[in-house]
Image (cartoon, rainbow, N blue to C red):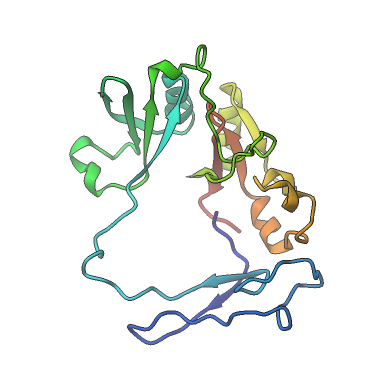
């Protein structure tokens, strides 16, 4: 999630690792709340480190795609394509499962290797929503036993979050967090954070969070809608 909070730029000479001051309980700034756990960065500061030295071996590496396992292919395609504007680049039936590769409109099969922002939907027919007993963990279900912790969300930038929310909701999908709200229970956090055991969320984060929205896809995964310009 992008954030426009108070920013610190760290500087270092070429071929040196960024050096950040490690805060200790004696010198940490808690903005008036002593319940925050010790950490390496000052609370409420947006750290922008300098680029790490470029390694020739990894200079052309890019994050290309992520994979979500799904139960209902048609419902997932309606959500990601009809509501969020992705298109199906290709479909491949591997036998026990089928892969649906989605991307922006300008992505084609012969440019997959150099593209970014791709989503692979991995459908196992035996796990169809109507018959499956296999639990699918969204990464944000802290009410289950044991709780589901790990994966957070997928993020989309959109020209208008309000219009995107209206489109998703009118298609029958759930809105988790509308615009202008910034309650801690909407942030996908464990109970000990929601209940304030580690202190309160700083106002700078809440200011950004109010400009975002979250919706739930057909399998329960959280999807963040981010404005192209965060104020």
Furthest-top residue in this view: 130
Quadrant in the picture for residue 109: top left
Is residue 181 in sight in this rendering?
no
171 vs 226: above or below: above
Q: Nearer the viewer, residue 38 or 223?
A: 38
- Left or right, 54 with respect to 5, comes to left
Which image quadrant: the N terminus?
bottom right
The x and y percentages for residue 23 are 64, 79
Is residue 137 in sight in this rendering?
yes
x 57%, y 31%: residue: 220
Q: Nearer the viewer, residue 33 or 102?
A: 33
Furthest-front residue in this view: 146
The x and y percentages for residue 151 are 52, 44
Q: Nearer the viewer, residue 189 or 210?
A: 189
- Left or right, 83 with respect to 196, comes to left
186 vs 92: above or below: below
Furthest-left residue in this view: 110
49 vs 146: above or below: below
x 33%, y 23%: residue: 97
175 vs 9: above or below: above
x 45%, y 26%: residue: 70
The x and y percentages for residue 26 are 74, 83
x 52%, y 12%: residue: 130
Which image quadrant: the C terminus?
bottom right
The x and y percentages for residue 12 are 42, 85
- Left or right, 152 with respect to 188, comes to left
Q: Nearer the viewer, residue 94 or 87?
A: 94
């Amino acid at each position: 999630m992008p954030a426009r909070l108070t920013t610190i730029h760290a500087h270092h000479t070429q071929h040196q690792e960024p050096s950040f001051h490690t805060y200790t309980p004696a010198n940490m700034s808690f903005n008036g709340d002593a319940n925050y756990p010790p950490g390496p960065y000052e609370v409420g500061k947006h750290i922008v480190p300098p680029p790490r030295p470029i390694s020739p071996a990894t200079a052309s590496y890019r994050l290309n795609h992520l994979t979500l396992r799904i139960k209902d292919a048609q419902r997932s395609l309606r959500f990601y394509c009809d509501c969020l504007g992705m298109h199906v680049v290709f479909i491949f039936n591997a036998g026990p499962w089928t892969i649906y590769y989605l991307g922006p409109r300008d992505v084609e099969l012969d440019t997959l290797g150099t593209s970014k922002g791709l989503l692979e939907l991995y459908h196992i027919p035996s796990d169809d929503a109507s018959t499956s007993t296999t639990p699918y963990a969204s990464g944000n279900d802290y009410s289950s036993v044991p709780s589901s912790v790990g994966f957070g969300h997928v993020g989309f930038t959109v020209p208008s979050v309000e219009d995107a929310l209206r489109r998703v909701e009118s298609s029958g999908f759930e809105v988790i967090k509308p615009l202008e709200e910034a309650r801690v229970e909407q942030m996908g956090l464990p109970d000990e954070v929601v209940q304030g055991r580690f202190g309160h969320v700083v106002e700078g984060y809440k200011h950004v969070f109010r400009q975002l929205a979250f919706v739930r896809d057909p399998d329960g995964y959280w999807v963040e809608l981010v404005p192209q310009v965060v104020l």
